[in-house]
Image: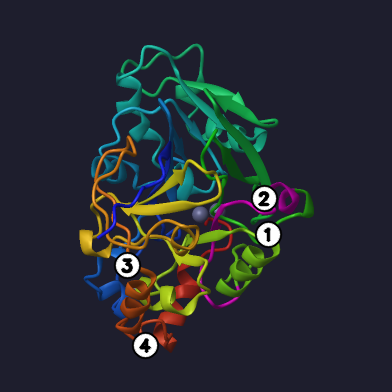
Amino acid sequence: MAAHTIPPVADFSLTFLGTGTSVGVPVIGCDCEVCRSEELKNKRFRSSVVVRAGDVTILVDSGPDLRMQALREGLREIDAVIYTHAHLDHVAGFDELRAFCWRKHEPLPLHATEGCMETLVQMYGWAFSPEIFVPGYVRPEARVIDGPFYYGDLKITPLPVTHAAVETIGFLFEYPGAAKVAYISDVKIIPEETMALIRGVDVLVIDALRTVDHPTHFTLAEALAAVEESGAKEAWLTHLTHEFDTETLEAMVPANVHVAWDGLRILGLAHGRSCMAESSGHASADEIRCSGLALSCGIPGVPARGSDAGIGGDFIQFHPAGIEAARGDLPRGAGDSDGERDRVGHAGEGGHFA
Ligand SMILES: [Zn+2]
Ligand SMILES: [Zn+2]
Ligand SMILES: [Zn+2]
């Protein structure tokens, strides 16, 4: 076997802490195929990601599953939290930020739009109050987002979108040498100004709630249309309901679109035009999947273990034919919705709280 050179990986990663909709998957009391599935990729905490760029660790949202997400991913320290919006599935884990504050001398910067910050202050006023000091509690430093901002060399640009009645944004992450990554977890309409910001982005992480229309979230079809319109080289679907079996959906979507799962980590490659994925261990090692884009940009398609990536853990690359073969083996029918699941799906997705 010829020796292959693995391109150096920029010290940038995005890890999916959760890929589920507001009620999570499995759904309490639901007996559908996906909720009963033992497949780890079908177990979805509420949507959230953590971005690492050099020495900087940024948590996106503090949802109700934050404690278990942090424990699973070994997340011990964060430099800041950046909020997409104030729906409970994105803020209700605020209390869990205590443990991160215990490890910091300085207050924890919380970045949110003005509207989102107002809600956070209403909900957790004691934490923000200069008069009240609660020992051991979250010590936030409120920073209102009014444009792009930096942590070290990481540039974070807010991406305003329309989603329910609350002010909602996604984020564009740009780090020298890494793929440009846009994260939009909750969206019904991407305004033209925001579309312009993500046009041609390397990686788009995008809301794809379910197939049935929803007043405040992209359906799968709307998500795929947005991927196409944006010209994103690669996309990962998130904020998913129990309608979707991960592997079944993965086999249905275009080659440059993938279905995210909890624990998936996207790495930025040094040439800045691509990415690849690894798993943090939530899914088993034989399910680690290299992105189609990485395979198509000259990286040798043979399994390779270890790297000079500077990021812990092995990563594995599969030959494209291997991925195709795997797709052929995927279970069928899990994505078919029956009446019961539709009913639960509608009931579970309150338009104003997700
Ligand atoms: Zn279910
Ligand atoms: Zn949400
Ligand atoms: Zn929401």
Sequence order check, earlier mark of 3 and 2: 3
For numbered disc 2, what is the local secondary structure? helix
Q: Amino acid at mark 3?
A: Asn
Kindly identify which residue carries mark 1. 230
Measured as percent of width and height from the top left, residue 132 is found at 45, 14
Tell me whether the residue at label 3 lies in contact with that at label 2, contact meaning CB atoms closer than 8 angstroms: no
Sequence order check, earlier mark of 4 and 1: 1
**Which residue does the image show at 70% across and 64% down from the upper left?**
229
Q: Amino acid at mark 1?
A: Ser
Cα distance in 3D space between marks 2 and 4: 34 Å
For numbered disc 3, what is the local secondary structure? helix
Answer yes or no: is residue 243 visible: no
Q: Residue furthest right?
A: 192
Sequence order check, earlier mark of 1 and 2: 2
**Quadrant of the frame with the N terminus:** bottom left
Highlighted magenta segment, given as a residue range: 194-213
Magenta span includes 206:
yes
Sequence order check, earlier mark of 2 and 4: 2
Sequence order check, earlier mark of 3 and 4: 3
Q: Is residue 103 left or right of residue 9?
A: left
Task: Indicate which label's residue lies in the foreground, 1 or 3.
Answer: 1
Kindly identify which residue carries mark 3. 42
